[in-house]
């Protein structure tokens, strides 16, 4: 499985593009920066779920946010996306405090894919949904240009949704709807992509394709990709950086192997009959006593 996740055959042209993106990443050192933020389910919710969190993410990086249920992964994603304010601290994207950005400005910087179903017309097609990703540039009633349509076409192709372009959204499975939402975000053409449980409804093969896609967007296109997930094995082997959340504490950050060696990933394997191999970054489950 590890070979599948790492097997990216890059052409000379792609390698040259990656080099340019890495140089760009050095100029804009961190596309996302968190400065001592605290989050809660809402300002009236009382208890803080994430506190005193400072971190930064460079262009071209794929980061996974891990944590048990209730650790605050979705809350952190919504806060980063500007859907709710932090209790304290500041969030910067491309060097600008997002609290000072308009909704349209944010939509041109960060795209987000949430787990909850979005309210779209039952008669809307996949292609029409993906085309909505161009709204930050055309306006809600704006007409798509030739360039816009090419971007939509590329987003459909990149997510494997071209053959479903004429399907009604209401006819899609949960997993297919999730892919369509990822395609819409790709059409948004933002340097930062935030995803909350992007593989929650997908079968194994589709999960593998999605993680490969997200890693490719970071490595080949220089995007900063941040995904909250429960897929530990995929995250361990695909992500450059992990953010490990435990409710009410300061998150721990580092590469998967760094965190494994420090014992920071042991929190996920406390149940009897679960064995975590830090060297191989894998785990075994024994159901019989």
Image (tube, helix red, strand yellow):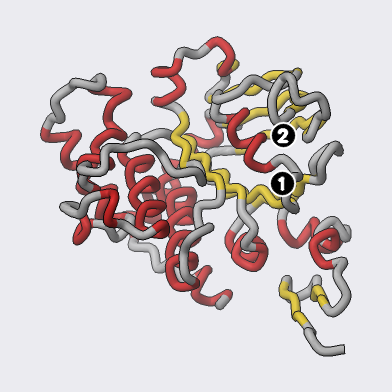
**Which secondary structure lies at badge 2?**
strand
- The residue under the point 74% across, 29% down is 40
Viewer-nearest residue: 94 or 40: 40
Q: At which x and y percent is residue 253?
A: 76, 45
**Which secondary structure lies at badge 1?**
strand
196 on left or right of 125: right
Whole-angstrom CA distance, mark 1 to mark 2, is 9 Å
Residue 157 vs 86, above or below: the answer is below
Q: Is label 1 in contact with label 2 (beta carbons under 8 Å)?
A: yes
Q: Which residue is mark 1?
A: 243
Q: At which x and y percent is residue 257?
A: 75, 62
At label 1, counting other C-alpha atoms closer than 10 Å, the crowd grade (few under 14, some 14-19, many 20 or more) is many
- The residue under the point 72% across, 54% down is 255
Residue 256 vs 31, above or below: the answer is below
- The residue under the point 48% across, 68% down is 208
- Quadrant location, the C terminus: bottom right
**Residue 29 can be seen in this image:** no
Residue 287 vs 175, above or below: the answer is below
- The residue under the point 74% across, 20% down is 44
Q: Which residue is mark 2?
A: 55
Sequence-wise, which precedes: disc 1 or disc 2?
2
Query: Residue placed farthest to the left in the image?
Result: 146
At label 2, counting other C-alpha atoms closer than 10 Å, the crowd grade (few under 14, some 14-19, many 20 or more) is some
**Residue 181 can be seen in this image:** yes
- Quadrant location, the N terminus: bottom right
**Badge number at residue 79:** none
Q: Quadrant of residue 83?
A: top right
267 on left or right of 131: right
């Amino acid at each position: 499985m590890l070979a599948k996740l790492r097997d990216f055959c890059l052409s000379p042209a792609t390698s040259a593009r990656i080099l340019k993106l890495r140089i760009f990443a050095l100029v804009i050192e961190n596309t996302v920066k968190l400065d001592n933020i605290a989050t809660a389910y809402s300002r009236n919710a009382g208890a803080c779920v994430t506190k005193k969190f400072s971190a930064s993410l460079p262009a071209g990086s794929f980061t996974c946010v891990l944590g048990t249920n209730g650790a605050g992964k979705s809350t952190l994603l919504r806060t980063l996306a500007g859907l709710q304010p932090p209790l304290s601290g500041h969030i910067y994207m491309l060097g600008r405090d997002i609290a000072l950005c308009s909704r349209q400005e944010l939509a041109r910087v960060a795209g987000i894919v949430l787990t909850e179903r979005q309210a779209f017309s039952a008669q809307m097609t996949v292609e029409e949904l993906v085309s909505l990703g161009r709204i930050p540039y055309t306006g809600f009633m704006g007409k798509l240009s030739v360039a816009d349509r090419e971007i939509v076409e590329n987003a459909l192709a990149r997510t494997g949704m071209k053959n479903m372009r004429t399907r009604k959204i209401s006819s899609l499975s949960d997993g297919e709807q999730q892919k369509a939402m990822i395609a819409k975000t790709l059409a948004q053409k933002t340097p930062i992509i935030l995803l909350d449980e992007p593989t929650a409804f997908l079968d194994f093969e589709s999960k593998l394709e999605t993680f490969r896609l997200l890693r490719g967007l970071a490595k080949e296109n220089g995007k900063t990709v941040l995904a909250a997930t429960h897929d530990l094995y995929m995250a361990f082997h695909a992500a450059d950086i992990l953010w490990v959340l435990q409710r009410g504490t300061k998150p721990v950050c580092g590469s998967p192997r760094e965190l494994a060696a420090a014992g920071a990933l042991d929190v996920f394997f406390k149940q009897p009959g679960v064995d975590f191999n830090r060297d191989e970054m894998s785990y075994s489950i024994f159901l019989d006593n």
